[in-house]
Image (tube, rainbow, N blue to C red):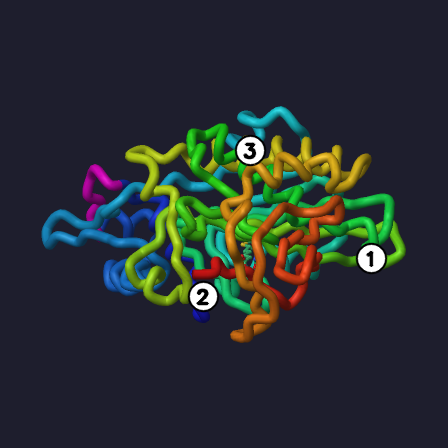
Amino acid sequence: MNSSPKPLLLDILKKLNATQFVSGEDLAEMFQISRANISLTLQQAKTFGVDIQRIHGKGYRLATSIDWLDASQIQSLRQETGSVTVLPVIDSTNTWMLQHPDDFEHGSCLLAECQTQGRGRRGRQWTSSIGGSLTFSLRWDFPFGIARLSGLSLATGVAIARALHRVGLTSAQLKWPNDILIHNKKLAGMLIETQGDALGPIQTIIGIGINVHLTAEQREEIAQSVTDLSEHFSHPPSRNAILAILLDELHSVLKVFTEKGFAAFQSEWESLHAWQNQPVSIMQNTTTILQGIVTGVNADGALVLRTPHGEEIVHAGDVSLRRAS
Ligand code: BTN
């Protein structure tokens, strides 16, 4: 998604629901603009993943209702503390936090209804849509340097899996190093970035994206096998409720990680690994550089493989994991 929705689009969408039609005339009155302008603005909705039903003489309604993000609802549903900011449309929550370090303190969370330039790992794009994604970043500061952050993304994966299990998605699993899968299809991912002194103290921006409802166009755009929450629930829990649980799990895991490192989560991570004891290939770009059976991860979060030449330790970086046929 490269263009930005007009700020007005979200305001108008918030006046619509999936049950009743709202006339163009009423909307024009509410926003003090012409009906033509309402119509023009709503034509943009499809580009951002929102289907609008329009019937002459009746007006507009949403094809599917949207549970809008709401900071006060999130705060009321969680146990832990920390500020929660919801912005309507920004390029990327990670980029925003990195660019405004003084606006976000340790433990604070920034959510976006819509990201126009969401970033994934290894330079990839992260696709999202209005109401169809949960995209946020959490700032977490560590009193030590980058050397002790190995395994942080795996520990974060444990927090995400715990939260998904708590909302009923007990089939959510992890794939080394950073993916969250359901039945081997990607549901969520994370991008962790750092700022500050590499020797410590260091600040991390933990960006997490969860697919809530992917449109057919988005599924085509994404070059891998993906899933979303709507495939697994007839009535998915609200994004606010999921986020509240997720923030609680993240705070709890990150506190333990600060004290004990990834070693405290090693066996839980292995029990959640989708490809534990499976044959895999380690890929660098499109080249297979190693093959073996996954026996687990070590206390630093590196992958441990049994190969015909003995045990091999693989560190996350520019490599990716594929299941071997
Ligand atoms: C991946 O699996 O490639 C990582 C995806 C991370 C996406 C999230 S969405 C919120 C935050 N902001 C971004 O631009 N990226 C992360």
Q: Quadrant of residue 265?
A: top right
Q: Quadrant of residue 292?
A: bottom right
Q: Amino acid at mark 2?
A: Ser
Answer few, some or many: residues within 10 Å of disc 2's Cα (few below 14, many 20 plus, some between 14 and 19): some
Residue 103 percent across, percent down from the top left:
72, 50
Q: Nearer the viewer, residue 111 or 282?
A: 282
Secondary structure category for the residue under label 3: helix
User: What distance separates the C-alpha of mark 2 from that of mark 1?
Assistant: 31 Å
Residue 155 percent across, percent down from the top left:
66, 42
Secondary structure category for the residue under label 2: loop
Q: Could you tell me if residue 209 is visible in this image?
A: no
Answer above or below: position of 244 versus 46: above
User: What distance separates the C-alpha of mark 1 from that of mark 3?
Assistant: 29 Å
Q: Are marks 2 and 1 in contact (CB under 8 Å)?
A: no
Q: How many marks?
A: 3
Answer above or below: position of 81 versus 114: above
Q: Nearer the viewer, residue 246 or 14?
A: 246
Q: Earlier in the sequence, mark 3 or mark 2?
A: 2
Label drawn at residue 4: 2
Q: Which residue is mark 1?
A: 196
Q: Nearer the viewer, mark 2 or mark 1?
A: 1
Residue 100 percent across, percent down from the top left:
71, 57
Q: Main secondary structure of the magenta part?
A: loop
Q: Which residue is mark 3?
A: 162
Task: Identify the magenta region.
Answer: 18-24
Q: Quadrant of the N terminus?
A: bottom left
Answer few, some or many: residues within 10 Å of disc 3's Cα (few below 14, many 20 plus, some between 14 and 19): many
Q: Quadrant of the C terminus?
A: bottom left
